[in-house]
Image (cartoon, grey):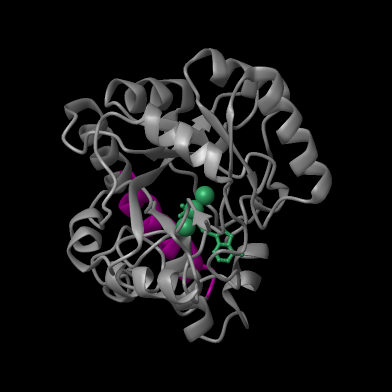
Amino acid sequence: MLIDLHTHSSVSDGTETPATLLATAQAAGLDVVAITDHDTTDGWAPAEASRPRGLTVIPGMELSCRWLVDGDRPISVHLLAYLFDPEHPGLMSERTRLREERLGRGERIAIALAEAGYPVTWERIVEASEGGVVGRPHIARALVEAGAVDSVDHAFATLLHPRSPHYVAKIDTEVREGIALVRAAGGVPVFAHGLATKRGRVVGDDAIAAMAAAGLMGLEVDHPDHSPEERDHLRGLAADLGLLVTGSSDYHGTNKTTPIAACTTAPDQLEALLAAGTGSVPYRD
Ligand code: AMP
Ligand code: FE
Ligand code: FE
Ligand code: ZN
């Protein structure tokens, strides 16, 4: 059984439509794939409608959250949420707020870049996102198109990095509130790429313990951005805190260099996750 629990489609910042994403998943030999676009469930219906026979699809989302730090900027944390009720009012209004937040923040980054002389426009970035949830990958592509950087990766390492003078933060959901919302909606919250230092600052073990106390159910341990040491550390924490362990690619089509199924989840962990999720059901034969 090959199981990948974290992928993005063009409904957010991946480059493949949900239907193409599922075809890619099946061609890669996956038995189970989760669709986890940022702050939206818009990919669920097209994924259900286009699911190839034999492939199980777990409906999910990656919620943009933050961990507040006394006397410093908040730390960005991503919360994967599986099998929640897509119509739970609290979670629905929070993801709507987050998408609006992304628009305001994206425009401010675009304006800051334009003022600094980079030939990008917010209108072009929104147009190129084709109705998907706008994120820095769309701005990165605009910078590549404009010849300002040679790759999306390069844009993230420089102009779009949290330490860049052009960066603007979003007001993301306080992560314990996010965990509570996902649980209230019958979902399974899993902390995504918790030690991925190349994304910026990461939280400490104390924060992960506090998240577990707030109802977190799993840690994404095997992720392309985690070193072997980071994986070992997270695996130990998951054992100590009684959390599920997941592995996934965080596939974004050609917006990232990672192939689908680059990391995978053990079948027993998937079974536990399926048993815990009560807000919606997987799409399967
Ligand atoms: P945002 O949510 O707008 O802050 O943008 C963060 C998104 O950019 C996340 O979905 C990441 O997966 C993606 N991302 C982070 N680093 C990179 C990179 N080097 N190349 C492509 N996408 C990235
Ligand atoms: Fe993304
Ligand atoms: Fe993420
Ligand atoms: Zn992701």
Most extreme residue toward the right is 229
- Residue at (41% x, 60% y) in the render: 8
Residue 135 horizontal/vertical position (percent): 41, 59
Q: Viewer-proximal residue, 231 or 177? A: 231
- Residue at (78% x, 51% y) in the render: 227
Q: Viewer-proximal residue, 84 or 200? A: 84
Can residue 50 be seen here? The reply is yes
Left or right, 1 with reference to 33: right
Residue 21 horizontal/vertical position (percent): 37, 70
Residue 148 horizontal/vertical position (percent): 58, 81
Q: Viewer-proximal residue, 56 or 93? A: 56
Most extreme residue toward the top is 213
Secondary structure mostly taken by the magenta-highlighted segment of the chain: helix
Left or right, 132 with reference to 213: left
Total number of numbered labels?
Answer: 0
Q: Is residue 209 above or below residue 153?
A: above
Quarter of the image where the C terminus is located:
bottom left
- Residue at (20% x, 63% y) in the render: 46
Q: Is residue 283 above or below residue 180?
A: below
Residue 236 picture quarter: top right
Magenta-tinted stretch: 101-117
Residue 167 picture quarter: bottom right
Left or right, 162 with reference to 106: right
Can residue 70 be seen here? The reply is no
Q: Is residue 39 magenta?
A: no
Residue 212 horizontal/vertical position (percent): 56, 19
Q: Is residue 101 above or below residue 92?
A: below
- Residue at (47% x, 64% y) in the render: 30
Q: Is residue 161 above or below residue 99?
A: below
